[in-house]
Amino acid sequence: MTHAAAPRQCLLVEDQPTTRDWMEGVLELAFPGVSIATAATLRAAYAWLDARQDPVWLAVIDLGLPDGSGIDLVRRLAQDRPATLPVVASIYDDDAHLFDAIAAGARGYVLKDEEPALLVGYLQRIERGEPPLSPSIALRMLDHFRGPRRKIDDDAGLSPRETEVLALLARGLTVAEAARRLGLQPQTVASYVKVIYQKLCVSSRAEATREAVRRGLA
Amino acid sequence: MSRAPLSPGLIIIAMTTLIAVSAGVILWLSASTPWLGVGLVPRDGLVVLEGPAWGLAAGTEILSISAADGTRHTIEAQDLLAEPDSLPTYAAINALYDRQQALFDLIGEPVIAIKVRTDAGLQTLDIAPAPRPLSSLPGSFWIQFVTGITSALIAFWVWSLRPRLLAPTLFALSGLGVLMVTLSSAYYAHRGLALPADAFRVLMLINHFGILAFSSGMIGLFLVYPRRLVHPRWLWLVPALLGPPFVLDSLQILIEAGHYYLLVMAITLTIMALIVAQYWATRRHPDERAVLGWLGLSVAIAIGSFALMSVTPALLGYDTPLSQHYAAGGIIIIYLGLALGLRRYRLFELGHWAYRILFYMLGVFALIALDAALLVGLGVGEAPALALSLLLIGLIYLPLRDWVWRRFFAPRHIEEHELFSAAMAVAFAPSRVDSARRWRDLLARLFDPLQAVDHTNDLNAPSVSEDGLTMTLPAVAGAPGLRLSHPFGGRGLFQPGHLALAADLVTLTERAEESRQAYMRGVGEERRRMARDLHDDVGARLLTGLHTADERTRPTLQAALSDIRAIVSGLAGEEAELDRVLAQIRHEAARRLEAAEIALDWPLVDALGVAADIRIDYRAHKALTSATREIVSNVIRHSGADTLTVALECTPENLVLRFADNGRGLPATALAGETTGYGLRNLRQRLADLGGSVAFGRTSGTTITLALPLHLAEPPEPGVNFPHSAVDLPS
């Protein structure tokens, strides 16, 4: 075994054994040869991460875990291991859950009751750097960045082009379609979306800090 | 112009009092001037009885009257002349005044002797002159009286709402002129027989200066309205040019009496010419042309008919016994026309809300008139009747009057605790739209503004401007910023107390809003807990089942999971915006087709304006989502197509979605709706339950048309809509 051939490391956090097995199958289908570590609880996942210095390439995280929310793990990964792609796998598709996950730093969001073939497609697209963004999330983001409090921190504001992209996504276009409509490469639009993700992450972190200061916690 | 804060209510009370007092004085004068008790008319240069009186027939000639001391005066037709200014020379006018004085001295005697010529010969009667009962005043008196009061009321009504604008001020000046002209003329022209010379002179002066005021007002008005023809500073030229002839006429110097009617004619022609000039000036401004069409037409008709009926005969030297007073009634056309056209043509920038204050004005006028009538009634009553009247007034009239005043005119008051519950009701309304509506209702209850318009501002607290005429409120509880003007039905101003009240209310509502948000956070917390439980227990089990299930049970389990999602996200039972639902459906289809490498042609319809305000029932939302999901699944699994085209048609009542693929098409049995193989039977059932339909067809591939009626919720009201008060829409 050589370094060059070292398999990409993936962490799967899922408490339900059947679903975990099924998801492992999906991951192997999507990324042949990937090395998958599994954890059933947050605590196990933290322990696994602490014991590990090598880069982790992908983390697929369930939200409802016996000892807490997967969001916490997403946030920690986004802060401590920026090279890791945190992806949330959930059964919820409502924008509140999605928005929280994205604000925490999730780079992808998949539904566990999708057809395996579809799921494989989504995961491969995340790997290629195409972040998913549903219309309701796009709307929520637009609201978030347009909100009255956003005016103060300009560093986390959206550029006109980014706003344009979000507005198209909010109307139900996919990244590729939005790119065609704007006369851009899909990668360019995807990079806009990634920037928007980061800005949301920054702004939600700033907001959390502000909130903490306001409450006298920090 | 004065910058003193004047509320429309204050102006109205002042002006209505002025009108009522003037009217009262004229009635009192008419009723207290000595009168022979008979109607006299001129006929063929003689004075005859208008109707049978004193036991004599109508048409009996009156020759002279004499006092007990032997002073005797013949009576001439000239003594009954209605308008002394129709005489050609000042000498004739002064002679008339002198004869009036002499006659007045005579009829001031307790008993006078009147010599008449009957068919049987000359006859002398002893008559006691007495005050004239109002009921004996002829119709022409009342026409002038009502014309003056109505015109002035309408003119001052308009002015009270726009006291700072030039055009309404000039209009009010004309109304004041009409009041002066008609009331003075009503009295002296119906004097019975005689007035003191000095009184006559003063009345003529008032009459002529009324004409001056009316003319200046009208000429000024058409110089600046609807188009500004000259700069307002030149308006001073109007009285400067018109004033001297009037002053010369009053002083009886330089000009002769006959020139007066020439002057009036010249003024009439000037006003007509200005209307024509305005017509030309407004040729490229249809809205102003419409205003002119209405206002200019009423003025032209009114002064035109007046000129034809009274001034022209006087100029040509005909006697105009009383026609002028009927003609004066025509002036009312101007003011009634304005009142009727005000809303339609937005005259003087007023809207239909202005009518409320007119009703208020009439109420105030009626009350003042009633008070005055009671006072007069008391003054002439006998002593025991006086005591009884005082008692009745104290016990019945005053409490009733007070009640009427408070019921209809006094501002309403809201108690502290009511204020609190009102603020809570605003914050805790079922929806943002309701919140905004309740907020507006509350403001309407508190301040009763005639006008309320949406107003974008960055205010944190309310502020008052235009000397208390308007208050601007920040955006609160989902309602936009508001600009309220003419508070208390136009009868008051925003005082510091009202500002403090509004500020309290804004703070209170904001607090309540914060509480509501805290409450909603609690609800969200609870919902998340339930969601966690559902996820951990039911969801996980269903998911496990799903991942081990066969093809036949998978759809059921997927549907169950989707129901759980709906429950968790609180969607069930709620309405969703159609354009959001469509975006979500389109996105899902696009993603799935992209994964299956099938092109999607589903153009965004930019003209989908109708969908923006439509909210659809959750069941419709779900039916649309699952129907599209099903159709897309079929395309992916069975059609072999490489393109799916979707077309959307939307009316406020119906939504039609047409799906067309270019694959191999459905088998005939599926088209007939008989097979269950593609899950399409469920689709048919689901849409039928909601009153919709699904139609299958085959062209090059399969076409499926979904039609679904949209259950419409009330669209949000555009602008402000106070339930009980008139409201102006911003123009």
Image (cartoon, coloured by chain):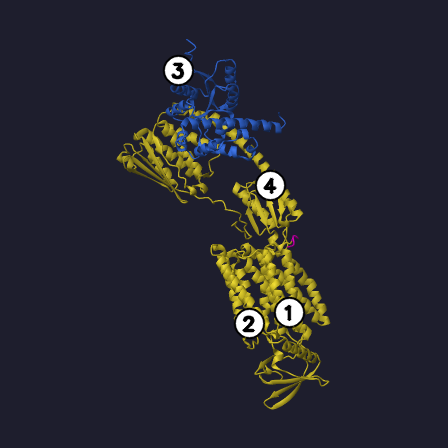
- Packing grade of label 1 (10 A; few <14, some 14-19, many >=20) is some
Question: Are discs 1 and 3 less than 8 Å apart at CB?
Answer: no
Q: What amino acid is found at the position of numbered circle 4 in the picture?
A: Leu
- Marks 2 & 1 on one chain: yes
Q: Report the Cα–Cα distance between label 4 and label 1.
A: 59 Å
Few, some or many C-alpha atoms within 10 Å of disc 2 (few <14, some 14-19, many ≥20)?
Answer: many
Q: Which residue is mark 4?
A: B459
Question: Looking at the picture, do discs 1 and 3 lie on one chain?
Answer: no
Q: Is residue B64 at all visible to an observer of this figure?
A: yes
What amino acid is found at the position of numbered circle 2 in the picture?
Answer: Val
The colour applied to the residues of chain A in this rendering is: blue
Identify the image quadrant of residue A175: top left
Real-space CA distance between mark 2 and mark 4, rounded to the nearest whole angstrom: 60 Å
In the image: residue A61, left or right of residue B658 = right
Q: Nearer the viewer, mark 2 or mark 3?
A: 2
Q: Which amino acid does the dot numbered 3 rest on? A: Gly
- Which residue is identified by label 2? B311
The residue indicated by pointer 3 is A33
Label 4 – label 3 distance at C-alpha: 62 Å
Instruction: Give the mark toward the camera: 1 or 3.
Output: 1
x%, y% of residue A203?
54, 28
| Residue at numbered disc 1 | B248
